[in-house]
Amino acid sequence: MTIPAQFDAKTIENKWYAYWMKNNYFHSEPDHRTPYSIVIPPPNVTGVLHMGHMLNNTIQDVLIRRARLKGFNACWVPGTDHASIATEAKVVAKLKAEGINKNDLTREEFLKHAWEWTDKYGGVILDQLKQLGCSCDWERTKFTMDPDMSASVIKSFVDLYNKGLIYRGYRMVNWDPEAKTTLSDEEVIYEEQQGKLYFLKYKIEGSEDFLTVATTRPETIFGDTAICINPNDERFAHLKGKKAIVPICGRVIPIIEDEYVDVEFGTGCLKVTPAHDMNDKTLGEKHNLEIIDIFNDDATLNSFGLHYQGKDRFVVRSEIVKELESNGDLAKTETHLNKVGTSERTKAVIEPRLSDQWFLKMEDLVKPAIKSVLEDGDIKLHPKRFDNTYAHWLNNIRDWNISRQLWWGQQIPAYYYGDGKEDFVVAENIEEALVLAKERTNNQQLTTNDLKQDVDALDTWFSSWLWPMSVFGGIMDPESEDFKYYYPTNDLVTGPDILFFWVARMIIAGYEYTGKKPFTNVYLTGLVRDKQRRKMSKSLGNSPEPLELIEKFGADGVRVGLLLSASAGNDIMFDEELCNQGKAFSNKIWNAFKLIKGWEVSDAIPQPESSKVAIEWYEAKLQQTLLEIEDNFGKYRISDALMGIYKLVWDDFCSWFLEMIKPAYQQPIDSVTFAKAIEMLENNMKLLHPFMPFLTEEIWQILAERTAEEALIVSTWPEMKPFNAQLIADFESTIDVISGIRTIRKDKNIPFKDTIELKVVNNDKASTYFDSVVTKLGNITSLEYVSDKVDGALSFRVKSNEYFIPITGNINVEEEIAKLTAELVYTQGFLKSVQSKLSNEKFVNGAPEKVLANERQKEADALSKIATIEQSLAGLK
C-alpha cells in the first residue's frame, strides 16, 4: 500500500477507535487470567472534558493498555456521578429560564426534569473521553443513580443504621444558602478575607450604662440571647446578674459568666447567638439559653429580622450598620482579617445553622483505613508525602453529616409514621418499612399511606464511597462472580483534592463491607496550571479547550505532551508547546517508519558487519530501557517511563540505529538486517502503544497483514532478557568518536562524500567492537591503530584516546594554522580572565558555591580546549 506522506491523526483516530470498538477489545469478562482492574473517578454528569480529566484519564489508559499487553485481563470501569448539588443547581437554573420555580413542583415533577437533563447532557464527557483514546469497558458504564447503584446506597444506609452507626441529630451544620443544603465540614473552604470588626453598644437594663461588644456580623444581633463575660474579668464585675438590651430589637437578654470568653479579644464581652455559631451553641446549651434562628434557607432574614425581613444578610449588614450609627449604638469600626467559610461547590459564604440532620459515626469506622495506609502499607499513596495529609484528616475525623436538603440523589430511606422526631423506621423500601412500623406501633391497621419518607437526599459522596464495590455488584451480591474476580481493584488514579472526600472514604467502606482494601495503589496527579502557575479555570480564560487541542495536535500528541510534564503529585505547568512536542514526536516516528518501508530489500547481499553490530547494540539498549520502564512503572513514575521510551525511539532508534543500518543511496538493504529493523520497530510500537495508541496501531497494521487477534492492542509486551551493559557503555564512547569526526568535517568543510582516513592511538585500550560503525558513519576508507601521534593531521581526543585525520588536498595548511593560532590566542586570553577571578581571594570567599563551580568548569574546559588546539597545531607544523 502507499504510505501517506503525512501522519493524518484525525482519520487514523476515527478508524482505529471504531476498529477497537467493533472487535470489543475493551470489554472484560472473568476468565482464567489474572485480573487487572481500575475504576474511573466518576466525573460529574454536569461536566465536560477539562485538562485535569485529560491528564487523569490518559494515565489510566496508559496503565490499562499496558496491563492488556502484559497478559492481564484488563477491566477499566467508566461511569459518571450524579453530583447532587451541581446537577440540581443546573436543573433549577434551566427551569428558572423557562419561567418555572422549583418550589412550585412536586418532587416527582422536578426529578422528571432532572432525568431529562441527565439523559441529554450526562454522557457528554464519556463521549469526549473516547476522542482521547480511552479504552474503557463501555459495556460496564455505571451511573451513581442507576437502579442497582441506588439500591446499593440504600442497602448500605440501612445496614449502617441497624449497626447503630447512623443517627439523627439536631446539630449546628454548614448551610449553603445558594444550594440550600447542608455541607460536610470537608466541603467548606476557609479563606482569609479583609472585613470589619464592629463595636456595638448594649445598654444595661435599668441604667444609663452600656457595655461594648465587638462582632464581625452585626446582622446577627436579632438572634442574640445573652451577653457573656469572663467571671475573672474585674472590669465587668459590676455587671454580674444584670441584663442587657439588644440594640434595634430591644430584647432584654441576660448577662452570663463563662471562662470561655477571651478577656484579650475585642472588648472582653461576647454576644451569644446560639443558632448561628458553633461555639455560641455550646454556651447556649450550657446556660440553657433561648435559640433564635433569624435566617431563611436562602440567607435572607426571617420575621425575627423585623423591618429587614426578606433582605439578604449582606445587604442587611451594610444597612444595619447605618441604623446602629444613627441610633448612637455603634462605638467604632476597625478593619479585621477574618477566616470565612465558603462552599466548595457554589462558592457561597457558609451560614452556621441548627438543623435536624443524619450523621454517620466515624470514630471506629476509620480505624482500619488508618492502619492499612499508615501502619501496614497494604495501600500505598504515590507520592508517599500524602501520607501526612491522609493521617491529619483521618486522625481528626468528625461524624459525617450525610443528609442534604436536595431532591436529586438517593432519598434517605427513613419513613415517619407519626409527628415526633423519633417516630420513624429505616428500611430498604416502603413495604419493609410498613412491617417495621406495625411492629413499632403495635398498630396493624397502618398502611403505606400512613408513612411519609424523609424528604432529604444522601450526600453524593455517600454514594461514590461504594464505587469500587457497587460497580461490580458487591453490595447487593457479595458472592457475584464479577465482584469476587475484579475486587479488590489494582490502581486508583485521582487528584489529591479528593484524597479525603473520596479516596479515604472508599478505603473506609471497603474494610467495613468486605474486610479488604478497595485498591492497592493510589496515584495522585498534580493540578494542571498555566505557565504563570495559575490554576486553570474558565473564569481566568487560561484553560484551553481539550477537544481543540486534540484537533490541532492529535490525541497522541496531546497525551505525550501532558505526560512528559506530569510527575506524580506535582503540579503541571501546561504549555501548548508540550503538545506540539508530542505532535513532532508522532511525525518523527512516522518518518522513520516511512524510511524503513521505503528501502528495497535483497536476499542476495550479505549482512554488513556494521549492521550486525548495530542490531546487537540496539537490542541491548531496548532491554536496558525496558528494565528502566518497569522500575518507573513500579514507582508510578509514568512521566519518567515515557521519557525513557521517548529517548530510546528518538535518539537511539531514529538518530543512531537507522543511520547505522541505512543502505547507501539507491542501494538495497540485506534481508536479515531489514527483518531485524522491522522487529525492533514493532517492539518500539509495543512500548509506545499505551502512550500513543492510534499512531502505533496504524504503523503496526501497515507493517504486516494482521488478523483481529493480532492487533497491537492485544499483542504482547516485549519480553525482558539479559543484556550486555558493556556494549551500551562502549557505544557511548563510539558516539563521541563519530561526533569528533563530524565536527572536523564541518569545521574544515570536508564534504561527507569525500572519504577520509582515521588513525587511532588507543591509550585507553577502548573496545574496537564498533569500528565498522565508525567507518561507515565517518565515511572512512582506512581505520588504523598506531602507537604514536601522526604528524600533518587534524586531531581530537575521546577520553585518553587520540584520533588523527591526515590532511588531504582539500585543506589549506597555512590557513588552518592561522585559524587555529587565532583560536588558541583567544582561548588563552579567556583562560587568563577566569584564572584571575579564581585567584582573587575576595571573589572566592564571597561568591556562591554555584558561581564558583561554574567558573572552575570554565577553567577546566579552556585548559582542555587549549591542549586540543596545541595538539592540532603540532600535527600541522
Image (tube, rainbow, N blue to C red):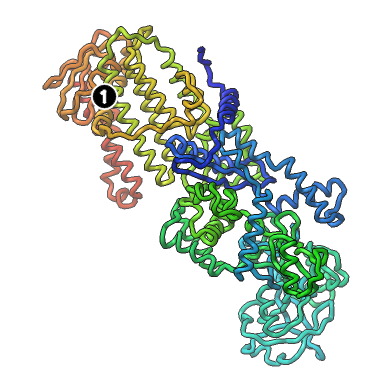
Task: Name the outermost residue toward the front.
Answer: 444
Vertical placement of residue 419 versus 477, above or below:
below
In the drawing, does residue 104 fall left or right of residue 178?
Answer: right
Left or right side of 239 for 658: left
**Residue at horizontal 86%, vertical 71%?**
303
Percent across and percent down for residue 240 are 71, 91
Rendered residue at 45%/55% (across/down): 379
For the point 47% across and 23% down, the residue is 700
Give, as a three-letter code, the residue at label 1: Val
Give neighbour class at mark 1: few <14, some 14-19, many 20+ (Cα, 10 Å): many
Please say whether residue 131 is visible from this viewpoint. yes
Q: Nearer the viewer, residue 580 or 127?
A: 127
| Image location (x, y in percent) of residue 290 | 76, 81
Would residue 472 be found to the left or right of residue 247 on screen?
left
692 left or right of 669 in image: right
Of residue 599 and residue 419, the one placed in the foreground of this image is 419
Q: Is there any visible trace of residue 217 in the rendered image?
A: no
Identity of the residue drawn at 34% across and 9% down: 602
- Residue 497 at what x, y percent from top left? 57, 54
Q: Quadrant of residue 476?
A: bottom right
The residue carrying mark 1 is 737
Label 1: element kind: helix
Q: Position of residue 848 (x, y in %)?
A: 35, 50
